[in-house]
Image: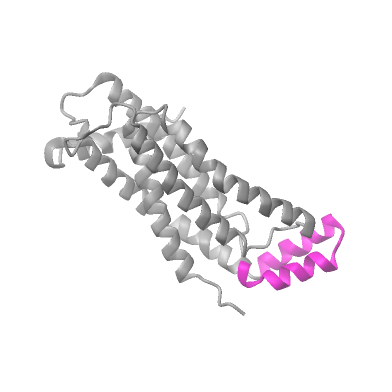
Amino acid sequence: MLNFLTKPLSDLLMFLSHHVPGHDLGIVIILLTIIIRIVLFPLSRQAIKAQSKLALHKDQIKAIQTKFKDKETQSKELMKFYQENKINPFSGCLPLIIQLIVLVALYQVFIGILKFQDSSINYVFLGFLDLSQKNTVLAVLTGIVQLFASLLTMKRAASIPQPGASEKSAALQKNLNRQMSYLLPVFTVFIALTLPAGLVFYWFISTLLGVGQDYYLYKRFSVPKS
């Protein structure tokens, strides 16, 4: 199903493994993660820029929601406002969807590599972390990094108005976001405990780089406090 993605990812991984010192799979994963992050950076930048615009026009959006109580009319007025101000309120979904697809594709690639144990690849990262086996410590570390990512996202989401949402539904959404911010890291640990360390290591590095990237972009496109 994802052959269009697994094949190039597998080829890139094998290419990198033959050119890094010691054919270290851990170094390959780090390089692969950086490459994927660079490719997705324009989408992430656009998403956070759109979120910043939503936060900047928060008062105008709230005024439209207050003025037009009818949901259909309200939606039309909001879409008109977004078009006039060149805002795409759903642009943040695309990077997440693509990252999820890439993660699934990488899962298939890693499972294939680990299953056949290619002798040209060194599966022990820096001589101590066996990426072909499950690793509890790495799973917990990934959950911790995911917690930081979730808290950063929750903090940002608090400043962004919800399209078409009433005050009550917005409060419920805020409460749900808070709960998910703490549940997602726990869920991450449980999932990571069932996966080979190679895939978890990618998850860890990707999330860590994502936190740094998003922090930088949030600062760059931060909305001045009134």
Tag count: 0
Judging depth in this view, the residue of 105 and 139 nearest the camera is 139
At 12% from the left and 37% from the top, the residue drawn is 22
The reply to whether residue 166 is in sight is no
x and y percentages locating residue 99 in the rendered image: 46, 43
Q: Relative to 36, is 96 on the left or the right?
A: right
Q: Residue furthest left?
A: 22
Q: Residue furthest right?
A: 70
x and y percentages locating residue 130 in the rendered image: 24, 30
x and y percentages locating residue 177 in the rendered image: 62, 50
Magenta stretch holds residue 20: no
Q: Quadrant of the C terminus?
A: bottom right
Magenta stretch holds residue 70: yes
Please name the predominant secondary structure of the magenta segment in the image.
Answer: helix
Judging depth in this view, the residue of 195 and 135 nearest the camera is 135
Q: Relative to 180, is 41 on the left or the right?
A: left
Q: Relative to 195, is 12 on the left or the right?
A: left
Q: Quadrant of residue 25?
A: top left
Up the image or down, 176 lies above or below 134; here it is: below
At 59% from the left and 68% from the top, the residue drawn is 53
Q: Quadrant of residue 215?
A: bottom left
- The stretch of residues the image draws in magenta is 55-84
